[in-house]
């Protein structure tokens, strides 16, 4: 069954110049990239993305981590991969959440680490299931940024919305 999954290359992955390596590993899946962009992660976006972990002791450090506060630049690379069993295939390549427990051949096993202050720098995010993928993809992308129709859309007219344009 075709599925979509959100992939984030986290700030440590970008800082360590691992983008190419990670995309090469993901290309083994033969899935299709249907959306991609570099995102400046706001506090609101970070907290919405990880809201299910808000009661964990590591939550505030996790928010700082995904916002790039430990790596000098507030950015992640966000992609949507699409195809047969996309979630399972990408999660398998990513490896276990704890990078010290992840198999050495997985992305997290090869490139992740736990810092001395206990932050799991595990390089990549992959949605865990279809419901989570839908919630996350809708959080990170607008419909027109994705080149396939994943979820129902509607058209609205937005009035008096302040936007930035080239000067
Ligand atoms: P996942 O990323 O493998 O789906 P989740 O349980 O959804 O794992 O956790 C989200 C992120 O929170 C992890 O990728 C990792 O960055 C961080 N995290 C999870 N558990 C811990 C922990 O026990 N200590 C520190 N960070 C953690
Ligand atoms: Mg998760």
Image: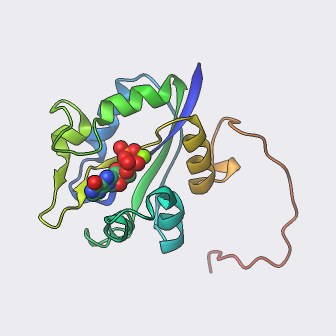
Q: Give the residue at x 46% y 67%.
A: 41
**Above or below — where is 142 with respect to 102?**
below
Q: Give the residue at x 69% y 76%.
A: 163
Residue 119 in the image, given as x and y percentages of width and height: 23, 61
Quadrant of the drawing holding the N terminus: top right
Nearer-the-camera pick, 67 or 78: 67
Q: Quadrant of residue 64?
A: bottom left
Quadrant of the drawing holding the C terminus: bottom right
**Above or below — where is 57 with respect to 86?**
below
Rendering colour mode: rainbow
Q: On the rendered structure, is 73 left or right of 148? A: left
Residue 7 in the image, given as x and y percentages of width and height: 44, 44
Q: How many marks?
A: 0
Q: Give the residue at x 83% y 79%.
A: 160
**Above or below — where is 27 with respect to 147?**
above
Nearer-the-camera pick, 73 or 123: 123
Q: Give the residue at x 49% y 71%.
A: 42
**Above or below — where is 16 with respect to 62?**
above
Residue 129 in the image, given as x and y percentages of width and height: 52, 35
Q: On the rendered structure, is 110 left or right of 2? A: left
Q: Is residue 72 visible?
A: yes
Q: On the rendered structure, is 140 left or right of 21? A: right
Nearer-the-camera pick, 17 or 47: 47
Nearer-the-camera pick, 26 or 88: 88
Q: Is residue 14 visible?
A: no
Q: Quadrant of residue 20?
A: top left
Residue 86 in the image, given as x and y percentages of width and height: 48, 28
In the image, farthest residue toward the left: 116
């Amino acid at each position: 069954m075709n599925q979509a999954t959100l992939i984030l290359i986290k700030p440590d992955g970008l800082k360590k110049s691992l983008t190419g390596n990670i995309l090469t590993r993901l290309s083994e899946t033969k899935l299709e990239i249907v959306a991609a962009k570099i995102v400046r992660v706001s506090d609101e976006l970070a907290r919405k993305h990880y809201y299910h972990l808000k009661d964990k002791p590591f939550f505030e450090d996790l928010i700082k981590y995904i916002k790039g506060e430990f790596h000098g630049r507030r950015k992640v690379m966000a992609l949507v991969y699409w195809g047969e069993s996309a979630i399972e295939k990408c999660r398998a390549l990513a490896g276990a959440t704890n990078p010290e427990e992840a198999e050495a051949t997985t992305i997290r096993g090869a490139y992740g680490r736990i810092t001395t202050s206990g932050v799991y720098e595990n390089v990549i995010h992959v949605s865990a299931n279809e419901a989570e993928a839908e919630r996350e993809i809708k959080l990170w992308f607008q419909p027109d940024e994705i080149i396939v129709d994943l979820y129902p859309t509607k058209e609205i007219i937005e009035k008096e919305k302040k936007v930035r344009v080239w000067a």
